């Protein structure tokens, strides 16, 4: 049977998926994520639940997906477990209500953990393609704007369901570099020595016998618009650019510069924009996970020479610009599986300057990327850990306050630890730069308070630091989470009075 005989509707494809099935969803962020089939699975779940019948699926993804995948399935209460990263409001609500199990993971690790047998293998791989090519007893799947963990999902799954998305042109072929490393003890070095190196195929290849269904769709990516830059994010970007310029002048960064890894969001966009505008920084390359809007403009201007990533998480206008100029961009962009785009070996080898965003930091340099007040999951650790621990220079950025100043991004002790003081080298806010390299805990605390903390919180945090005079890391445990407690009680960390908590 050829794949041409397997065209079905999304509802028919969803009928293949059974209660308790484990599905590996393609893409990385909403870029390249399946849309119609997950929505149909959610509708199936709602129907069965109305009849009093159980239906939930386990979900592996690349990172977050679009609302028609994570959102639809969360609203249908159809998720048994979910990993490794998410960013949907309704799914976040479901996870925090303990309606589904969620285990946070470093993004580079999921594919290999599946191959190692540490996690149950997927029953289905559900992926988006711009083209399918039959080659004898094999099918070539040409992916779209995101790769994620598709190669491993497709190799391990019993059945593969493909959404053939006519909104994504077949000319995307050639932008992907599909490579899976061997597993130990056969694994060798991954032969990527600069961001533009290509080491794999331009498509995913599966046995034709695995292809269970093909669903024709015509759906744009569900990538939302980034929040416009404001005075705070622009200043953070300027401070990052100024720091890197100073490192070059000091000879600690080569004059030819080093590849950049940048997280996703409006702060990351501001940072890249500032790097592009700073003419003391030469045109540079990127080795990152998410290629976002600002990268496209900087490529047009010649400020970014090449970008290696896992997804094109960009708005519809930027994506169309790439498609309209595909010959120009095909030589400047490559999309890889996330165990390669986020690989610690490659980050260390190429000397990446990594720039990620903190949800919260403490005055000793520890970072919380995931949990609000230590309990409520926000999104997940994503790739930040993959890069931070192995960076040439690891930078964390954050606005110094949130909610109109009621929350300080800097506290005595983080309420959840994702990145320890041993991995975090630089912290930057709109107020300035804290260089933590070669400093003791007390020195780091003074550096952070004086340079990064919002002025209205500096006296409070100085007082905290003065409470303990006989410790290497001067914590007063009864007060360590007092600012969080005060926020939960009064809604404003500025109301914190240490005497109300000190025992």
Image (cartoon, rainbow, N blue to C red):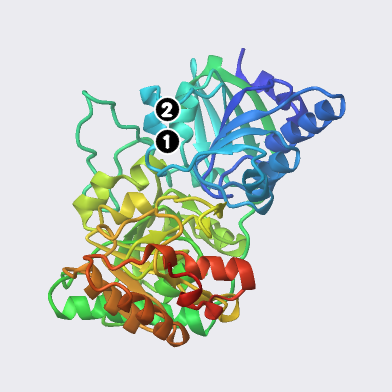
Instruction: Please state, as top left, top right, bottom left or bottom right, where the N terminus lies in the image.
Output: top right
- Judged from the image, the secondary structure of the residue bearing numbered disc 2 is helix
Q: Mark 2 sits on what residue? A: 114
Q: Is residue 223 visible?
A: yes
- In the displayed structure, would residue 390 be above or below residue 7? below
* Residue 424 coordinates in the image, percent (x, y): 29, 62
* Residue 473 coordinates in the image, percent (x, y): 26, 65
Q: Residue at x 22, y 69 (%)?
A: 470
- In the displayed structure, would residue 21 be above or below residue 438? above
**Spatial CA span between label 1 and label 2:** 6 Å
- Mark 2 crowdedness (10 Å alpha carbons): few <14, some 14-19, many ≥20: some
* Residue 255 coordinates in the image, percent (x, y): 16, 73
User: Between residues 501 and 428, which one lies in front from this camera angle?
Assistant: 501
Q: Residue at x 61, y 56 (%)?
A: 223
- Mark 1 crowdedness (10 Å alpha carbons): few <14, some 14-19, many ≥20: many
Q: Mark 1 sits on what residue? A: 110
Q: Residue at x 37, y 35 (%)?
A: 201
User: Between residues 8 and 107, which one lies in front from this camera angle?
Assistant: 107
Q: Tags 1 and 2 in contact by the CB under 8 Å rule? A: yes
Q: Is residue 400 visible?
A: no
- In the displayed structure, would residue 417 be above or below residue 344? below
Quadrant of the rendered image containing residue 384: bottom left
- In the displayed structure, would residue 338 be above or below residue 318? above
**Total numbered circles:** 2
């Amino acid at each position: 049977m050829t794949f041409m005989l397997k065209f079905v509707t999304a509802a028919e494809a969803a009928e293949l998926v059974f209660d308790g099935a484990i599905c590996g969803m393609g893409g990385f962020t909403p870029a390249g994520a399946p849309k119609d089939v997950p929505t149909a699975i959610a509708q199936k779940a709602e129907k069965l639940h109305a009849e009093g019948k159980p239906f939930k699926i386990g979900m592996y993804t690349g990172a977050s997906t679009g609302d028609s995948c994570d959102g639809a399935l969360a609203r249908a209460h159809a998720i048994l477990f979910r990993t490794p990263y998410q960013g949907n409001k309704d799914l976040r609500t479901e996870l925090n209500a303990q309606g589904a199990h969620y285990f946070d993971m470093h993004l580079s690790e999921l594919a290999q953990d599946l191959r190692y047998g540490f996690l149950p293998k997927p029953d289905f791989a559900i992926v988006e393609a711009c083209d399918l090519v039959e080659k004898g007893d094999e099918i070539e799947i040409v992916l779209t704007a995101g790769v994620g963990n598709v190669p491993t999902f497709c190799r391990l799954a019993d059945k593969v369901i493909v959404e053939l998305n006519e909104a994504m042109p077949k000319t995307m072929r050639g932008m992907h570099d599909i490579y899976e490393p061997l597993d130990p003890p056969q694994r060798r070095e991954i032969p990527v020595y600069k961001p533009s190196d290509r080491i794999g195929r331009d498509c995913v290849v599966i046995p034709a016998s695995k292809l269970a269904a093909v669903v024709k769709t015509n759906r744009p990516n569900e990538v939302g618009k980034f929040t416009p830059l404001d005075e705070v994010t622009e200043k953070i970007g300027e401070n990052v650019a100024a720091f890197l310029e100073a490192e070059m002048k000091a000879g600690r960064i080569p004059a030819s510069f080093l590849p950049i890894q940048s997280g996703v969001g409006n702060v990351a966009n501001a940072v890249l924009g500032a790097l592009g505008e700073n003419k003391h920084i030469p045109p540079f390359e990127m080795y990152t996970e998410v290629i976002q809007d600002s990268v496209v403009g900087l490529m047009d201007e010649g400020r970014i020479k090449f970008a290696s990533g896992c997804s094109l998480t960009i708005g519809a206008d930027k994506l169309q610009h790439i498609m309209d100029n595909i010959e120009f961009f095909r030589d400047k962009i490559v999309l890889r599986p996330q165990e390669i785009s986020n690989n610690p070996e490659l980050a260390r080898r190429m000397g990446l300057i990594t720039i990620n965003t903190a949800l919260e930091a403490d005055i000793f340099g520890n970072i919380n990327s995931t949990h609000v007040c230590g309990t409520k999951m926000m999104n997940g650790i994503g790739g930040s850990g993959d890069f931070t621990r192995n960076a040439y220079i690891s930078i964390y950025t954050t606005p110094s306050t949130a909610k109109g100043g009621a929350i300080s991004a800097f506290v005595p002790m983080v309420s959840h630890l994702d990145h320890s003081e041993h991995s975090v080298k630089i912290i930057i806010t709109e107020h300035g730069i804290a260089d933590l390299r070669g400093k003791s805990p007390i020195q780091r605390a003074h550096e952070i308070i004086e340079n990064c903390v919002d002025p209205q919180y500096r006296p409070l945090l100085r007082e905290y630091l003065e409470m303990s005079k006989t410790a290497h890391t001067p914590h007063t445990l009864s007060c360590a989470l007092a600012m969080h407690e005060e926020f939960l009680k009064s809604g404003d960390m500025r109301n914190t009075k240490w005497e109300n908590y000190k025992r």
